[in-house]
Image (cartoon, coloured by chain):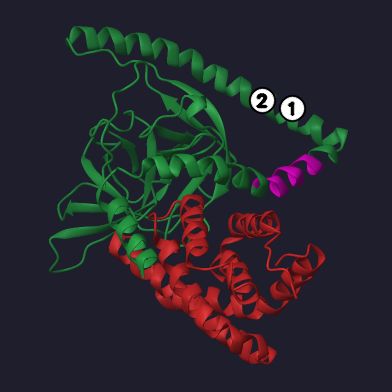
Amino acid sequence: MRRQSTSGTPVIIASLLACAWLEVLPLPDAVAFLRPAWLLLALIYWTIALPHRIGVVWAALVGLFQDVLAGTVLGQHALAMVVVVYIAQSVYKRMRVFPPLQQSAVVFMLAGVASLISFQVQDIAGRAHVSPLVMLAGAVSSAVLWRPVMHALRWTRRRFLVR
Amino acid sequence: MAVLALCVLVIFLDLRTPWLGWVRYVGGYFSGPVHYLAHLPVSMGSWVSDQARSTEDLRDDNQRLERQLLILQQKAQRLAVLEAENVRLRELLNSSARLDARVFVAEIIGIDADPNRQEMVVNRGASGQVFRGQAVLDANGLIGQVIEVGPLASRVLLVTDATHAMSVQVNRNGMRTLVAGTGHPDRLRLLYVPDTADIVVGDLLVSTGLGRRYPAGYPVATVSSVESVPGQAFLQVEARPTAHLDRVSHVLLVAPAEMPAEQEMAP
């Protein structure tokens, strides 16, 4: 019988901090709108890999951290991530067996939902003047980068025995 | 569900009340180091290029800077006389003397990743005597104001942000007007300029000090286009910020002679 103990919380936090670093890394203006939602990708991965541990509470905390990091309205990313992680938790069994392309398509939709929720909150705050279609570009690049991110995190999970 | 409701509540509280400032401050202990780390590749790149420069380059640089210094010193000589004269004239007019502001330097460690916002992060926080509402300059003009002070870093709202507007006057004739950001890094918009206003392309706009947020007399923008639309009550005037918003690496924070009391942020 497998022991149901948890381990590797520091590894999860370290991977999320690495993604936060990628989120604020300076990019040239021309490609800035293509920046993938690194933190969201990592969170989706951990949700699918460890659905019994990573849930909406983690999503809310990580989202709040991203809000502080990006200086946005507190709760903007938190709301988006809570919704996305909730959806991811309800489809994680199917996600695990999807072929790569289908997985990327689901990630595109999840990232799209997140960026549209973010857009909506920014609109309420009165500072959304870039079209939401431009913000969806980030969802496309997230979907493209999903496989590499997933493999990197899976390697991390196996290497450090996170469960 | 409960978490979702909590998120909505947090959004509401943060938009409508100042109660959640401590969340940002505490989060700043974690987000500050991330910003510093994200700046690392940039500072390492400039360090490497500094190390790789040849003596010849440095000598050229040195000569150029010495020439520049000479010119600036000559201007400063005249400035001292003019300043004294200005004080005398102001005394004659019984108006209050202008106080010289102190400035200190900060380094930009982050620009905003979100295309909806025109903001940057500088490497001075609460321990570096930064306060909310402080004016930020570069060598060529006004950049913006501090909107959030963290423990390790602070956030600066640029004049080009869509939520930013300030009072300026045309340097040539003293006409006052408002300049608002557009969200585009090199475009500002002048609001409510009447059709008959005396304003032409190339006019320098300087801060007026009205609103008591920015010190008076710093250049903000130059007018880049004036367009009269038939049937409209106002001119459509666009301006370009004089500060090099997308190229600066160091900025100046202006500390007024006396520290102001905590002021409310203009929306």
Percent coordinates x, y for residue A152 in the rendering: 75, 70
Mark 2 lies on residue: B67
In this rendering, would B197 be left or right of A1?
left
Q: Chain of mark 1?
A: B
Q: Position of residue B74 (x, y in %)?
A: 54, 17
Q: Which chain is home to disc 2? A: B
Q: What residue is shown with label 1?
A: B63
Q: Which chain is green?
A: B
Secondary structure, mark 1, is helix
| Residues in magenta, as a range | B39-49
Query: Is B41 inside the magenta-drawn segment?
Result: yes
Q: Are marks 1 and 2 in contact (CB under 8 Å)?
A: yes
Could you tell whether A66 is left or right of A50 in the image? left
Q: Color used for chain A?
A: red
Q: Nearer the viewer, residue B50 or B33?
A: B33
Residue B219 shows which numbered tag?
A: none
- Going by the numbered disc 2, the residue's amino acid type is Arg
- Co-location on one chain, circles 1 and 2: yes
Give the dominant element type of the magenta stretch: helix, strand or loop. Answer: helix
Query: Would residue A26 be visible to someone looking at this image?
Result: yes
- Please identify the quadrant where the N terminus of chain B is shown: bottom left
Q: Nearer the viewer, residue A152 or A89?
A: A89
**Element type at marker 2?**
helix
